[in-house]
Image (cartoon, rainbow, N blue to C red):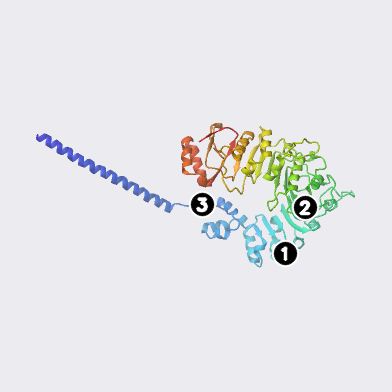
C-alpha cells in the first residue's frame, strides 16, 4: 500500500508541474505577442516614408506634374526644397502675368531654369517682358493672348531659333501682323491660331508667287512648309480659297473650330495628314454643307476626333457636319467622339445616291477602335438606332471604350430586363472588346473563362462600391494570385479598369 501512495503522490506532483508549465507557456506566448507589437511600433516609428525612398530624379518628375503648389512643396522638407531648386524644368514654365512689378523674381526664376527649354505665356504688354529677351533663344513654347498686336510689335526684334509651338489669340480681322514672326521661327512645328475673323482670301496666305501672278502655292500667314500640327479657331464665314490651293507637305494633325470647315478642307492638300479633329465652334455661325471635291486626298487620315464646344454643347449643324466628315474621311481606323456625335452617325440620314437606311458610320469600313465620351448607359440603352446598328453589324470587330464624366448612379449591368443590361450584352457580342472608364457599376461581379485567366467584369469598380462580402465571395472562386492583385490595385489606385474580351461569362 505504501508504494501506491508514493505513486499517487508523484502523479499529483507531475500534474501540478504540468499546470505550472502550461501557465508558463501561456505567459510566454502572451509576452511574445506583446513584444511583437512593441517591435512593430518601433519599426513604424523609425521607417522611412515611401515618398522619401524615391530617387531625386523620380521625385522631380512628380513635382513637374504639380504646377501650382510648388511653394508649399518646397516647405515640406529640406530635401524636397533642394530637389525643386535643382530641377531646371520646374522653373522653365513662365506665366508673365504672375510677375507684374516683380522683375527681380522673374530674373531669379529664369536663372534657376539654367539652359532648359522655356515655355512663355504672355497675356498683355508689360515691362517685365523685356527680362525674357536675353533668353529668346531658349523659348520652346510661346503663347500670346490679349493685345497680340502690341506684344508681337514688342518682340519684333527677336529671333526664336528653338521655338516649336506657337499659340496666338489674335482677336483681329487681319493676320498680317504674324507675317514678320514666321521668318524668325525656323524650327516652328505646331501652330494654333485663335480668334480668327474673316473673310480671308487665298492671296493673304501666300509668301511668294514663285513667278506666278496667282498666289496659291505657298503659305504666307501660315508657314505651311514646316508645320506638322495646325489648329484654327474662329469665325470665318468666307475663306475665298480655290480648291487644292493650300499645300501643307508635312502636316500630320489638323484641328478645325471654325465656321466653314468644308471650305478649308476643299482648299487643303496635305498628303501626310493622319489625324483630323473637329470642334464645334462656340457660336451659331457653323456652315454645314457637302464636301465638293475628291475625298481620295484624305485617304491617309486614320484618326478622327469630334468634340463639343468649350461649353460642352453639340448643336444640330455640328452633328450634320460630323455626318459629312464620314464621307470625307473614309479610311478612319480610330475614332473618338462625344456620345451625341455617335448617335447621329448611327442614325439613318437621307443622302443623295444612298439608301433610305443609310448610316454615316457605315463609311468607316476599316474602323478598329471607337472611343465614346460622355457615355450614358440609360440613354444609349433606349436609343433604338444604336441598338439597331449593333444588330445590323453582329461581328463589328471594333475595340470599344466608353467614358463618362457625370454619372450619378451606378449601372447594374447584370440585371435582367433593363436597357443598360441588354445593351451591355449586345456590346459584348458585337465588339472585339469593351472597356468602361469612370462608369460606376454595381458590386455584382462576373468572371471571364477565356484564356485561362479570370478577368473581372464589369471593368470599372469604384473602391467605395466593393465591400468585404464581395471580396470574400470572389476569393472563394478566384486563384489566390488574382485576389491578391485585386486587393493591391484597390489599395493603390482606388479603382480598377479592365478590358473585357467578348466571351461568355459565368457569375461569381
Q: Quadrant of residue 80?
A: bottom right
Q: CA distance from mark 1 to mark 3?
A: 42 Å
The residue that appears at 48% across and 41% down in the rendered structure is 471
Q: Quadrant of residue 266?
A: top right
Horizontal side, residue 345 vs residue 53: left or right: right
Binning the other alpha carbons within 10 Å of mark 3 as few (below 14), some (14 to 19) or many (20 upward) gives few
- Say if mark 2 contacts mark 3, CB within 8 Å: no
Q: CA distance from mark 1 to mark 2?
A: 31 Å
> Is residue 338 at least partly visible in the picture?
no
* Residue 31 placement (x, y as % from top left): 31, 48
Please tell me whether residue 36 is drawn above or below residue 10 in the rendered image.
below
Q: Which residue is mark 1?
A: 125
* Residue 424 placement (x, y as % from top left): 60, 38
Mark 2 vs 3, N-terminal side:
3
> Is residue 503 at least partly visible in the picture?
yes
Q: Secondary structure at mark 1?
A: loop
> Which mark, by number, is residue 51?
3
* Residue 154 placement (x, y as % from top left): 75, 63
Binning the other alpha carbons within 10 Å of mark 2 as few (below 14), some (14 to 19) or many (20 upward) gives some
> Which mark, by number, is residue 285?
2
Q: CA distance from mark 2 to mark 3?
A: 52 Å
* Residue 302 placement (x, y as % from top left): 72, 40
- Say if mark 1 contacts mark 3, CB within 8 Å: no
Q: Toward the viewer: 397 or 482?
A: 397
Q: Secondary structure at mark 3?
A: helix
- Say if mark 1 contacts mark 2, CB within 8 Å: no
Question: Residue furthest toward the right?
Answer: 213
Please tell me whether residue 17 is drawn above or below residue 232 in the rendered image.
above
Which of discs 2 and 3 lies nearer the camera? The answer is 2
Binning the other alpha carbons within 10 Å of mark 1 as few (below 14), some (14 to 19) or many (20 upward) gives many
Amino acid at each position: 500500500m505504501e508504494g501506491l501512495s508514493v505513486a499517487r503522490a508523484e502523479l499529483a506532483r507531475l500534474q501540478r508541474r504540468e499546470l505550472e508549465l502550461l501557465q508558463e507557456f501561456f505567459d510566454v506566448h502572451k509576452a511574445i505577442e506583446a513584444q511583437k507589437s512593441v517591435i512593430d511600433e518601433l519599426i513604424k516609428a523609425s521607417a522611412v516614408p515611401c515618398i522619401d525612398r524615391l530617387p531625386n530624379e523620380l521625385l522631380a518628375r512628380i513635382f513637374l506634374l504639380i504646377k501650382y503648389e510648388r511653394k508649399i512643396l518646397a516647405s515640406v522638407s529640406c530635401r524636397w526644397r533642394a530637389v525643386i531648386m535643382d530641377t531646371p524644368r520646374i522653373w522653365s514654365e513662365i506665366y508673365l502675368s504672375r510677375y507684374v512689378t516683380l522683375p527681380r523674381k522673374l530674373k531669379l526664376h529664369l536663372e534657376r531654369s539654367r539652359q532648359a527649354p522655356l515655355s512663355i505665356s504672355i497675356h498683355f504688354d508689360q515691362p517685365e517682358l523685356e527680362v525674357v529677351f536675353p533668353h529668346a533663344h531658349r523659348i520652346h513654347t510661346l503663347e500670346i493672348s490679349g493685345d497680340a498686336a502690341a506684344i508681337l510689335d514688342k518682340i519684333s526684334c527677336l529671333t526664336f531659333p528653338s521655338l516649336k509651338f506657337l499659340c496666338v489669340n489674335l482677336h483681329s480681322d487681319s493676320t498680317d501682323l504674324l507675317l514678320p514672326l514666321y521668318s524668325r521661327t525656323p524650327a516652328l512645328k505646331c501652330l494654333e491660331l485663335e480668334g480668327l475673323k474673316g473673310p480671308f482670301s487665298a492671296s493673304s496666305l501666300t509668301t511668294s508667287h514663285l513667278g506666278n501672278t496667282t498666289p496659291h502655292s505657298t503659305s504666307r500667314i501660315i508657314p505651311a512648309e514646316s508645320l506638322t500640327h495646325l489648329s484654327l479657331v474662329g469665325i470665318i464665314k468666307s475663306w475665298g480659297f480655290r480648291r487644292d490651293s493650300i499645300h501643307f507637305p508635312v502636316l500630320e494633325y489638323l484641328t478645325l473650330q471654325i465656321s466653314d470647315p468644308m471650305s478649308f478642307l476643299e482648299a487643303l492638300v496635305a498628303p501626310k495628314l493622319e489625324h483630323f479633329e473637329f470642334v464645334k465652334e462656340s457660336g451659331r455661325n457653323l456652315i454645314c454643307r457637302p464636301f465638293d471635291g475628291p475625298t481620295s486626298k484624305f485617304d491617309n487620315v486614320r484618326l478622327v476626333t469630334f468634340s463639343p464646344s468649350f461649353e460642352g454643347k453639340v448643336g444640330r449643324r455640328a452633328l450634320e457636319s460630323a455626318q459629312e466628315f464620314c464621307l470625307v474621311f473614309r479610311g478612319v481606323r480610330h475614332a473618338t467622339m462625344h456620345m451625341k456625335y455617335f448617335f447621329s452617325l448611327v442614325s439613318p440620314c437621307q443622302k443623295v445616291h444612298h439608301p433610305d437606311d443609310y448610316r454615316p458610320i457605315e463609311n468607316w469600313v476599316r474602323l478598329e477602335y471607337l472611343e465614346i465620351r460622355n457615355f450614358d448607359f440609360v440613354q444609349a440603352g433606349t436609343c433604338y438606332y444604336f441598338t439597331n446598328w449593333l444588330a445590323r453589324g453582329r461581328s463589328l470587330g471594333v475595340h470599344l471604350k466608353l467614358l463618362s464624366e457625370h454619372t450619378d448612379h451606378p449601372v447594374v449591368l447584370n440585371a435582367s430586363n433593363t436597357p443598360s443590361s441588354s445593351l451591355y450584352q449586345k456590346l459584348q457580342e458585337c465588339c472585339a472588346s469593351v472597356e468602361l472608364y469612370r462608369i460606376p457599376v454595381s458590386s455584382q461581379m462576373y468572371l471571364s473563362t477565356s484564356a485561362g485567366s479570370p478577368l473581372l467584369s464589369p471593368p470599372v469598380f469604384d473602391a467605395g462600391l466593393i465591400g468585404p462580402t464581395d471580396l470574400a465571395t470572389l476569393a472563394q472562386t478566384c486563384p489566390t494570385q488574382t485576389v491578391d492583385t485585386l486587393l493591391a490595385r484597390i489599395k493603390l489606385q482606388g479603382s480598377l479598369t479592365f478590358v473585357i474580351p467578348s466571351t461568355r461569362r459565368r457569375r461569381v
